[in-house]
Amino acid sequence: MKNIIRNSMIMLITTTFLVMSSIIHTSTASAGIIMKFSDVNKQDAAYSSILFITSNDYMNVYKDAKFKPKQAVTKADAAKFVGKASGIDIAKVSTTNSYEDISKKTANYSYIIALTAIDAFTNSSKFYPDKAITKQEAAKLFVNALNLPMKTGKEFTDVSVKNAYSDYISTAASYNILKSTSSKKFQPTKKMNRDDFAVALKKAIDAKEAIDETLLEEYDGDQESPDSDLDENVNVEE
């Protein structure tokens, strides 16, 4: 009886990890879409990331197969892109809105509110939905939306310890999600365009998947420990 319960628990936890992984990282092949862009080609450094992100419908493609790689990413669009990639449930979004400059008519409203609720966006009086997202804002968005463990310690000369985003910048840089311009500078207030955002989002998804796989391997290793084997040999009276 004990073995049956134990095996059922292992199967349940393993299934849960697999479902979470499939939400975060659906393969391009399973999407069944082959994208061809009129303004991005295979020689572009961001091509594979753009292909993955658009094939999985995390980011949009415009008319005439244009990706518009150098167009700035607004905060409202960033909310939708990361919200879709993280699989956040917008159906249960609270109706509470503390922003003065957005309403239910605002594009991607549900994603904005849902991500603010988990502190992926800084809750303040205004959201500025049409403003281009900066690298430091994107760092917090990626880390909190995908629930990445914090990694502090990476420092940049242009990021003060008093910067509210400093820990998120350090974490995003540690996972190689957002690159610095050099070993010393991060350019935290630099605006992000669509090709840079696609690359960063793909790296954030990869980081999340690697963490989930490690957790699953550690759990499997614990179940195969000598103590677990010993438990299996214990006779339990029913």
Image (cartoon, grey):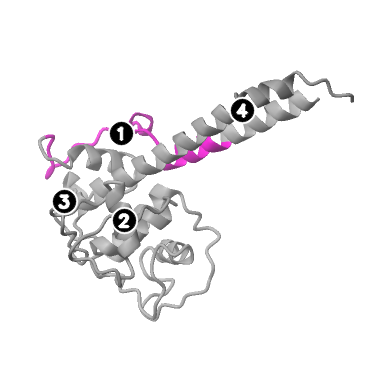
Question: Is tag 4's residue or tag 1's residue first in the polypeptide sequence?
Answer: 1
Residue 198 position, x and y percent, is 25, 48
Q: Which amino acid does label 1 sit on?
A: Ile
Q: Can I make out residue 137 in this image?
A: yes
Residue of label 2 = 153
Question: Is tag 2's residue or tag 1's residue first in the polypeptide sequence?
Answer: 1
Q: Splitting the image into 4 quarters, where does residue 27 fall? A: top left
Question: Is tag 2's residue or tag 3's residue first in the polypeptide sequence?
Answer: 3
Please state the extent of the stretch shown in magenta in the rendering: 16-42
Residue at image location 34% in from the left, 40% down from the top: 206
Q: Could you give the CA–CA distance between mark 2 and mark 1, rounded to whole angstroms?
A: 40 Å
Residue 200 position, x and y percent, is 26, 49
Residue of label 4 = 223
Label 3: few (<14), some (14–19) or many (≥20) C-alpha neighbours in 10 Å: some
Numbered badge on residue 69? 3
| Horizontal side, residue 111 vs residue 181: left or right | right
Q: Which amino acid does label 3 sit on?
A: Pro
Q: State the quadrant of the N terminus.
A: top right
